[in-house]
Amino acid sequence: MNSLVLRSLIITGFLSCSFIVNGQNNNYINSKFDFISGEKIIFYDDFTSESIGDFPLLWNTNGSGEIVTVNQFEGHWFQMTKSAYYIPEVKEPFTDYFTIEFDLFIKSDAGEQIPSVIDMYILSGDLANPALGSQPGQAGIKIQPNYDNVMWNNWSEAREWQGEEGQVSFTFKTSEKYHISFWVQKLRVRMYVNDQKVLDLPRGLQANYTYNIFRIDDNSDETTPFISNFRMAAGLPDLRNKLITEGKLVSYGILFDVNSDNIKPESYASVREIATVLKENPALRIQIIGHTDSDGDDAGNLNLSKRRSESVKQLLISSFGIDATRIETDGKGETMPIVPNDSGINKSKNRRVEFLKL
């Protein structure tokens, strides 16, 4: 094993330790979870735009699949039913900094632990003509959950398809829902499962390529993967500068349970960044405003947006010690959309939390 591979294994061969704090409404937050969503949403699909039984219009495949509902979990799910690739057709550039998030669960006939069932790729290639094989595109990284490990390897055409590889200990179990997050910062690739950082690869991607494809391969006849709430966002959020100098910050990194004011654990780092700005600027006062999309009735959305902004305030107070007198809250419901509520991606842009400098 060469020194670069060994170094990568040393860096990545751990799971973050959990340090849990109890926030508002039993929000259990992992302080080691440092993931922050990208600034601009470039793709979103919760699979509600098409009918049950249809293949999602925003995706490409060389196999088949369908939108379904399941008894265990809320929402619509994309069931990948054949051994094939599945690619979200993202038209906008990923940029050097981007994030990918989705929910995943897997049914299996092979027992509780999941065998090698899906490969997840970040690739530099041709979206209109996705290459097949174990090393598609001109360059890329493959991440593969495999029983009690997560395995990875990367490659590039310039290096004659060679690269690094490694694995870390992590066990995926069947019929459990996981929130998967990828955070790419130039060459650095981090992967999170729920509130744990599983991989942190400083040289996960190889230099001098434009990465523009995310791809999931279903490669097992024994298991069936399901995904939902798939979101990609580009750009590195500049939370501090926007709030201090521009006086307004729009956050897409603070997420809530469906029709609830309960803040999801993956929101921790975004809230922590706001708390850091407030601590570094003790004279700063802010207003938190919640916004929803147009689904549901007007009065319910207005009430929900107000409760969500109050939940963010309470988390800033209880977990970060911010003085309550420095924070005001409000909610606008669906009354102030930034784009028309005419598609899944636009609705996701309207569901947001705004911070205003007072």
Image (cartoon, helix red, strand yellow):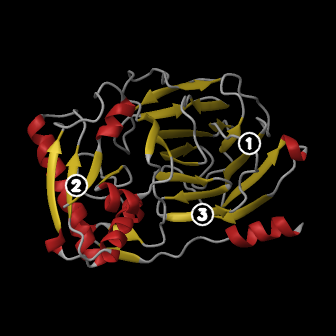
Residue of label 2: 261
Q: Report helix, strand or loop for mark 1.
A: loop
Q: Which of the two discs, 1 and 2, labels the residue nearer the N terminus?
A: 1
Answer whether residue 176 is visible to the viewer in this image: no
10 Å neighbourhood of mark 1: few (<14), some, or many (≥20)?
A: some
Q: Which mark is residue 43?
A: none
**Cα distance between the residues tagged 3 and 1:** 25 Å
10 Å neighbourhood of mark 3: few (<14), some, or many (≥20)?
A: many
Answer whether residue 298 is visible to the viewer in this image: yes
What residue lies at 39% left-to-right and 37% top-to-bottom?
70
Dividing the image into 4 quarters, which one contains the N terminus? bottom right
Q: Report helix, strand or loop for mark 2.
A: loop
- In the picture, measured across the screen, residue 64 lies left or right of residue 329, that is right
Q: Position of residue 192 (x, y in %)?
A: 54, 59
Along the line of sight, the residue nearer the viewer: 268 or 229: 268
What residue lies at 87% left-to-right and 43% top-to-bottom?
158
Residue of label 1: 209
Along the line of sight, the residue nearer the viewer: 168 or 171: 168
- In the picture, measured across the screen, residue 312 lies left or right of residue 16, that is left
Q: Which mark is residue 198?
A: 3
